[in-house]
Image: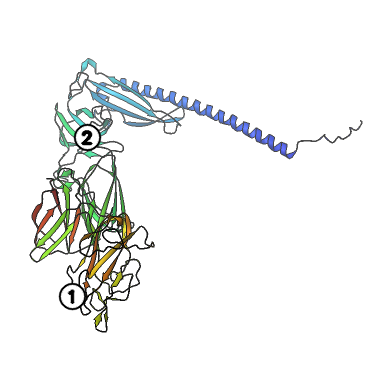
C-alpha cells in the first residue's frame, strides 16, 4: 500500500482547542442541567400542591362524617375528637395540617351557637416556595340543634390609640384543666367571640398578642407576686357573655447614655426603670433594675409603649439631669434616646425640674434658689458651671486635669503664699505696680457649647488697690491646639470683664475649648488684690435644659424659690431627706 506523504497541515487538536471545546461543552451542559432541575422543581412543587389540596379535602370529609357533637378539638373550644395539629405524609411528601374549629351563630346571637366554622391549613415546610393551602367551610347540626351548654367570652383588642387590632392572637386557657383551651384571631373590629365555653369562676386566663406587638393578659387571683390583679382571670357563666378588653401595640426601643456634664461617658451607672401601667396594687407591669455598660450605653429592645420613671440606684454617682424629663413617654413603634447626666454622689441632693405648665416642655434660664437660715444657694436651669478655686499646683498644665494647676503666668503673681488664692507677688516687702497675669489651663466642655456668665470672688477689692484691680479676658477655640485670642465683653482685645457676673461675648459661643486670663494690679505697693475663685456658666447638649442639682445640703426644711421673667413665680417649702430626691415644678406664662 502506498505511503501517504506527510503534509504540514495534517495534525490533531491542539491543547487550546481541546480546552475551549471542553469549556463550551460544560457551559451548555450546565445550562441544560439548570433547565432540567428547574423543570423538576416546578413539577415537584405542582405535585406537592396537588397532594396538599387532596389532603385538605380529605380532612374536610373526615369532619363532615363525624357526629356534630364530636366536631371540635381535643384541647380547644368547642371540644371534640379532632387534633389541632397533625403531621401527615402523602406521596412521599410530609405536610403539617392545622385545624381550627369555631362556634358561630349566623342569626347574630352572642351566646348560642348555630353552626361551626372549620378551617384546614396544610403547609409543606420542606417544599420550596410552597404557599399553604387553606380551606374554610361550615357545618350545621341536624334539626338545627344547639351546641349545648356554656357561655361566651368576647375579647376586644385595641392599640394605644384605641383603634381595633385585626389579626391579634387571643389565647384562652382553663386554669383548672389543661384540656380546655382555645387559640384564635380577632376580626376586622378587633373582636373574638368564643362560644360554648364551659362555666367556671375566674377559670380562664386570656392572653392577647401579635407578632411585633406588646402582650396583655389576665392574671390569677391570689398569686404570690400579684394577689389582687387589676385584670383577674375571666369568669364564665352558663348562657351568659363574659367580656374582656386588651391593649397591645407595636414594640419600641430605648437607648440610654450616662455622661458627665462635660459629655464624658460614665460607665456602669445603675438605675431603676419603672412603667406607669399597673397589673396589681402598686405593682407596675414593668420594673427593672438596669445599668449602662462600660461605654455608658444601655439598649433596651421590645419595650412596651408606656410612661417610664427613672430612679437612680448607683452607689457612686447620682442624676443631675435627665433628657427628656422623667417620667417620659415612650410611644408605640418608636426609638427613644434618653440621656442621663450624672455626677459624683453626695450625701443629700435635690434635683429640681422646671417645665412650662402649658406645653410641658422644660424651661431654661429659670432662677432656682434654695434658702434656709444661714444658707442660700442659687442656680439657673440649663446652665452648667465650671470653676477653679485653687492654683497652688503651679504652672505648666496645658489641658485642665489637676484642679490646682494652670498654664502659666508672667512671674508677678503668687499662688502659694495665700492658700487657694491668687495675689500679687511680694518683692522685698512690696507689691509690684506692674500688672500680674495668670493664664488658665484649657477647659474641655465636652462638646460645642454656648457661654453665658463670667464671675469671680471676692466681689469687692481693697480700695487702696485702685479701680479695676482685678479683671479678666476670655477665649474659646474649636481645637485645644489653636492660638488663644483673649477678648473682653465687647468682643475685642481692648476690653475686660472688670465686674463679676458679666455676660460672656457671643463670639465665644459655638466652640468647645476655653481659657481665661486674669489681670491683677495695685496702685498701692503695700496692698494686693485677691482672687479666691473663678467660674463661668455654659450650656451644651449634655446639660438638660430645665434642671438643676443642689448637692451636700442639710436634711432640714428649705424654701425653694423658682422664677423666670414672663412667668408666675413659685415659692414652696421642701423637706430635704437623706439621699437623692427630685422636685418637679411647673410655671405658668403670664
Viewer-nearest of discs 1 and 2: 1
Q: How far across and down, in percent of the image, does residue 219 sit?
A: 18, 41
As displayed, is residue 490 above or below residue 401?
above
In the foreground, 433 or 103: 433
Figure quadrant of the N terminus: top right
Estimate the x, y position of residue 544 in percent, counting from the top left. Answer: 24, 53
**Residue at the spot x=56%, y=28% of the render?**
36
Residue 297, image x and y in percent?
31, 53
Residue 65 seen anywhere in this rendered image of the structure: no
Q: Earlier in the sequence, mark 1 or mark 2?
A: 2
Q: Do the CB atoms of the residues marked 1 and 2 lie less than 8 Å apart? A: no
Q: Quadrant of residue 486?
A: bottom left
Cα distance in 3D space between marks 1 and 2: 73 Å
| The furthest residue to the top | 143
Q: How is the image coloured?
A: rainbow
Name above or below for residue 526 compared with residue 145.
Answer: below
Image disc number at residue 161: 2
Front one among 391 and 232 = 391
Label 2 SS: loop
Relative vertical location of residue 458 with respect to residue 107 in this rendering, above or below: below
- Quarter assignment of residue 329: top left
Residue 543, by quadrant, is bottom left
* In this picture, residue 216 sits left or right of residue 62: left
Disc marking residue 141: none
Across and down, in percent, residue 81 comes to: 28, 28
Mark 2 surroundings within 10 Å by alpha-carbon count, few (fewer than 14), some (14 through 19), many (20 or more)? few
In the picture, the disc for residue 464 is: 1
Single out the residue that lies furthest toward the right.
2
**Secondary structure state at the residue bearing disc 1:** helix
Which quadrant holds the C terminus? top left
* Residue 376 in view here: yes
Q: Residues within 10 Å of mark 1 (few under 14, many from 20)?
A: some
Amino acid at each position: 500500500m502506498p505511503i501517504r506523504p506527510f503534509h504540514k497541515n495534517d495534525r490533531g487538536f491542539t491543547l487550546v482547542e481541546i480546552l475551549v471545546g471542553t469549556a463550551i461543552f460544560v457551559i451548555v451542559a450546565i445550562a441544560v442541567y439548570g433547565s432540567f432541575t428547574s423543570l423538576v422543581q416546578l413539577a415537584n412543587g405542582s405535585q406537592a400542591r396537588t397532594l396538599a389540596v387532596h389532603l385538605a379535602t380529605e380532612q374536610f370529609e373526615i369532619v363532615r362524617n363525624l357526629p356534630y357533637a364530636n366536631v371540635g378539638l381535643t384541647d380547644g373550644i368547642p371540644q371534640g375528637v379532632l387534633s389541632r395539629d397533625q403531621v401527615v405524609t402523602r406521596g412521599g411528601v410530609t405536610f403539617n395540617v392545622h385545624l381550627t374549629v369555631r362556634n358561630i351563630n349566623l342569626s347574630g346571637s352572642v351566646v348560642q351557637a348555630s353552626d361551626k366554622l372549620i378551617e384546614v391549613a396544610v403547609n409543606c415546610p420542606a417544599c420550596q416556595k410552597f404557599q399553604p393551602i387553606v380551606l374554610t367551610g361550615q357545618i350545621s347540626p341536624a334539626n338545627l340543634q344547639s351546641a349545648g351548654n356554656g357561655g361566651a367570652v368576647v375579647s376586644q383588642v385595641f392599640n394605644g390609640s384605641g383603634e381595633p387590632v385585626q389579626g391579634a392572637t387571643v389565647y384562652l386557657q382553663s386554669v383548672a384543666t389543661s384540656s380546655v383551651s382555645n387559640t384564635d384571631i380577632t376580626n376586622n373590629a378587633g373582636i373574638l367571640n368564643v362560644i360554648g365555653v364551659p362555666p367556671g369562676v375566674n377559670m380562664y386566663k386570656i392572653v392577647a398578642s401579635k407578632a411585633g406587638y406588646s402582650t396583655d393578659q389576665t392574671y390569677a387571683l391570689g398569686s404570690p407576686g400579684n394577689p389582687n390583679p387589676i385584670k383577674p382571670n375571666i369568669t364564665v357563666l352558663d348562657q351568659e357573655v363574659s367580656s374582656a378588653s386588651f391593649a397591645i401595640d407595636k414594640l419600641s426601643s430605648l437607648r440610654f447614655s450616662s455622661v458627665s456634664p462635660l459629655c464624658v461617658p460614665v460607665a456602669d451607672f445603675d438605675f431603676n426603670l419603672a412603667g406607669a401601667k399597673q397589673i396589681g396594687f402598686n405593682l407596675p407591669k414593668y420594673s427593672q433594675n438596669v445599668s449602662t455598660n462600660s461605654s455608658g450605653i444601655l439598649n433596651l429592645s421590645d419595650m412596651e409603649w408606656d410612661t417610664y420613671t427613672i430612679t437612680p440606684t448607683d452607689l457612686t454617682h447620682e442624676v443631675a439631669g435627665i433628657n427628656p424629663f422623667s417620667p417620659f413617654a415612650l410611644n408605640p413603634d418608636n426609638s427613644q434616646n434618653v440621656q442621663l447626666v450624672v455626677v459624683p454622689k453626695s450625701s443629700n441632693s435635690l434635683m429640681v425640674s422646671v417645665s412650662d405648665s402649658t406645653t410641658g416642655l422644660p424651661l431654661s434660664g429659670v432662677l432656682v434658689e434654695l434658702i434656709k437660715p444661714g444658707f442660700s444657694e442659687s442656680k439657673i436651669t440649663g446652665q452648667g458651671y465650671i470653676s477653679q478655686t485653687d492654683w497652688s499646683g503651679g504652672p505648666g498644665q496645658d489641658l485642665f486635669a489637676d484642679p490646682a494647676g494652670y498654664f502659666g503666668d508672667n512671674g508677678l503673681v503668687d499662688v502659694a503664699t495665700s492658700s487657694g488664692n491668687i495675689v500679687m507677688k511680694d518683692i522685698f516687702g512690696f507689691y509690684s505696680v506692674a500688672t500680674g497675669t495668670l493664664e488658665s489651663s484649657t477647659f474641655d466642655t465636652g462638646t460645642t457649647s454656648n457661654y453665658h456668665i463670667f464671675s469671680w470672688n471676692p466681689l469687692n477689692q481693697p480700695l487702696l488697690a485702685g479701680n479695676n484691680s482685678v479683671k479678666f479676658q476670655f477665649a474659646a477655640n474649636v481645637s485645644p491646639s489653636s492660638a488663644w485670642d483673649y477678648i473682653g465683653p465687647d468682643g475685642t482685645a481692648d476690653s475686660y470683664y472688670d465686674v463679676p457676673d458679666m455676660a460672656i461675648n457671643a463670639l465665644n459661643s459655638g466652640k468647645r475649648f476655653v481659657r481665661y486670663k486674669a489681670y491683677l494690679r495695685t496702685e498701692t505697693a503695700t496692698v494686693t488684690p485677691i482672687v479666691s475663685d473663678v467660674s463661668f456658666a455654659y450650656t451644651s447638649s449634655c446639660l438638660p435644659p430645665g434642671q438643676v442639682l443642689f448637692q451636700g445640703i442639710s436634711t432640714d426644711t428649705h424654701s425653694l424659690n423658682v422664677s423666670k421673667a414672663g412667668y408666675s413665680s413659685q415659692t414652696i417649702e421642701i423637706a430635704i431627706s437623706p439621699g437623692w430626691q427630685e422636685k418637679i415644678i411647673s410655671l405658668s406664662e403670664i
